[in-house]
Amino acid sequence: MKKILCLAVIGVTLSCQSQKKEFSSAALQNKLTALDGAQIAFKDILAEHRGKTVVLEIWASWCGDCVKAMPKLKELQQNHPEADYVFVSMDKADDKWKAGIEKHQLKGSHYWATDGMKGAFGKSIDLDWIPRYIVIDPTGKVVLYRAIETDFEKIDATLNSLKP
């Protein structure tokens, strides 16, 4: 009985985490590094894309699952050119981050969380795995908070539901 109760509590906890509809104020205040080296608050990055559907990918060049998912991501971009793609890297060094963008020919806006997965930004979005995908609708509402590399069908369906 205790095992069933524990599993139920874990299930509800995970379910609640996966259903977030907005970012915490801590996440919004976090500063990320742009390609030109400028620091920009996450809320300002989101504001730049207001009015558009956004696919946010949290990734790193060293991440095998991230690299494995690149063809699916590129297919998603081909099927959903109406969406803006924003990449946040968890790389440990900016040269690795920039080399990863070039190597994988990632099209979109690029930012770097300089303190990695366990840092302030990662904690503020409940980051426990990469790649991680978050879909934001044109009003700025989070419509898919927790998706990973095996969830491309769910991401595609979500993007289809947001088309006018």
Image (spheres, rainbow, N blue to C red):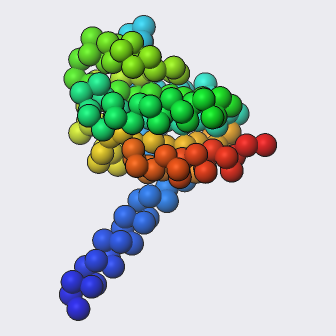
Dividing the image into 4 quarters, which one contains the C terminus?
A: top right
Does residue 58 appear in the picture of this structure? Answer: no
**Left or right position of 160 against 97:** right
Above or below for 49 versus 2: above
Instruction: Compare residues 107 and 39 and report the one nearer the observer.
Output: 107
**Left or right position of 47 against 128:** right
x, y percentage for residue 35? 42, 12
> Quarter-wise, where is residue 75 in the image?
top right
x, y percentage for residue 29? 44, 34
Above or below for 75 versus 139: above
Above or below for 4 versus 38: below
Dividing the image into 4 quarters, which one contains the N terminus?
A: bottom left
x, y percentage for residue 23? 48, 45
Q: Which residue corresponds to the image point at 39% horizontal and 12% vertical from the top-left? A: 102
Q: Residue furthest top?
A: 36
**Left or right position of 17 against 51:** left
